[in-house]
Image (cartoon, grey):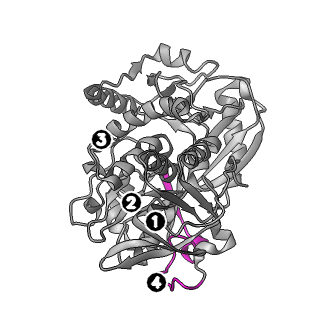
Amino acid sequence: MSPPVDPVRSDAALPEAVDVAIIGGGIAGVTAAYFLAKAGSRVAVLEKGVIAGEQSSRNWGWCRVQNRDEREIPLMLRSMELWDTLPREAGINLGFRRCGLVYATRSEAELDTWRRWIEMARNYQFHSRLLSAEEARAMTPGNDGAWIGGIHSPNDGMAEPRMAAPAIATAAQRLGATIHQRCAVRGLDVAGGRVTGVVTEHGRLRAGAVLLAGGAWSSMMLRRHGIDLPQSSIRSTVFLTEPAAEVTPGGLYTPDITIGRRGNGGYIIAANNRGEIEITPQGLRYARKFWPTLMARRKMVKFAIGSSFFRGPQALGRSWPLDRPTIFEQEDMRTLDPAPKTAVVEPALAQLGRSFPALAGTKMDRVWGAWIDSTPDAVPVIGAVERLPGLFLSTGYSGHGFGIGPGAGHLAADLVLGRAPIVDPRPFRYERLVDGSPIQKPGMM
């Protein structure tokens, strides 16, 4: 079952030419479209399925600086400002609220890690605070978790995944961008050693620049054109409960369960808190680059063999003609909708009731699966591909792209336009993953 997502009106026909063509209608792509259109660029967003149909509607909805990799903090701080200002500026509702995030633990090692993170984050004037055992218990009412402490960010919050990217896409349309759903891009149009547009299932579109924001599909698309992008995907299962009593106004992480209160009064539940890596040709291709991260986070994932070995964004497929239908146009690939692991739901609901007696008996509303596109260092790629002028990337958000999406879109727009970027883009450069540089281990998630 797919999560709900607000509909977006598609424009009637492809234009003949634009300044920027954006491949992918997730939050990173549509926010880039918004800022490009705001700057006066002619922009077209090309989405093989529907806006926000994949990971942008399947995530937890957390918008947080707390416990992020240091490389992402400047961009995330800018994103938090945009979550505040975009609704007023564009006249849209993103469902955003600064409701705070709380993490609680029984582990001295985990508490020490959070303590070190707080010390580092002070360099960015960000004010999470460490919680005592008493404070952690007070911020998890009804829970008898024997916490020894925790960490709290009152300024972090949540937004509504079903609303956010569609609302921003609509705002971009009002500024002149066009939105084309069920319009798969088959490949890049290349002439004279540079990108000159894209080839879609509905014809060619000339473009001065192309921004690939294709999520889990980005590496496959680039491989078609002889460009390596080390990327892997993690399959996760999440579910939403029916409305229930409030035990936290925002997001809450504990060793037992992770929950986030949604605008309808239900809770998003990260079932089992473990992702699943399916062994695939693409995964094997880039295994060496991912090895340090896998070792650092081996307790957070498990391995399996599934259908994605043969079909989907990580399967074999180095080349294909652009004048015939592609995998992107196959109905079951229009929107990646992996089957969720429903067996985790009942144990998670039972744990929810044990952790918070006030939520005992809470029922599931819907459950879904998701593919989380990841890079070897768990930091996204946002920037130009120097070997193919005119091509820019915004991908590999590694499970924490929803919250950073507004800032990422702004940064991508800046780089495409050649204007001063909102933050230093060097931590996100594409070349770091392919030029032989040592892969930096990921920081906090």
Distance CA(mark 4)–CA(mark 3)? 36 Å
Mark 2 surroundings: few (<14), some (14-19) or many (≥20) residues within 10 A: many
Distance CA(mark 2)–CA(mark 4)? 20 Å
Q: Is residue 121 magenta?
A: no
Distance CA(mark 4)–CA(mark 1)? 14 Å
Distance CA(mark 2)–CA(mark 1)? 9 Å
Whether residue 123 is visible to the viewer of this picture, yes or no, is yes
Badge 4 amino acid: Ser
Mark 1 surroundings: few (<14), some (14-19) or many (≥20) residues within 10 A: many
User: Mark 4 sits on what residue?
Assistant: 319
User: Mark 3 sits on what residue?
Assistant: 423
> Residue 378 versus residue 169: which sits nearer the camera?
169
Q: Residue at x 32, y 56 (%)?
A: 383
Placement of the C terminus among the 4 image quadrants: top left
Badge 2 amino acid: Leu
> Residue 24 versus residue 299: which sits nearer the camera?
24
Badge 1 amino acid: Ser
Disc 3 is placed on an element classified as loop
Distance CA(mark 3)–CA(mark 2)? 16 Å
Q: From the viewer's perspective, is the residue at label 2 or at label 4 nearer?
A: 2
Where is residue 8? Give x, y as percent: 66, 51
Q: Quadrant of residue 263?
A: top right
Q: Residue at x 51, y 44 (%)?
A: 402
Image mark for residue 393: 2
Which contiguous range is marked in magenta?
301-324
Compare marks 4 and 3 and give the one earlier in the sequence.
Answer: 4
The main secondary structure of the magenta stretch is loop
User: Mark 1 sits on what residue?
Assistant: 218
Badge 3 amino acid: Val
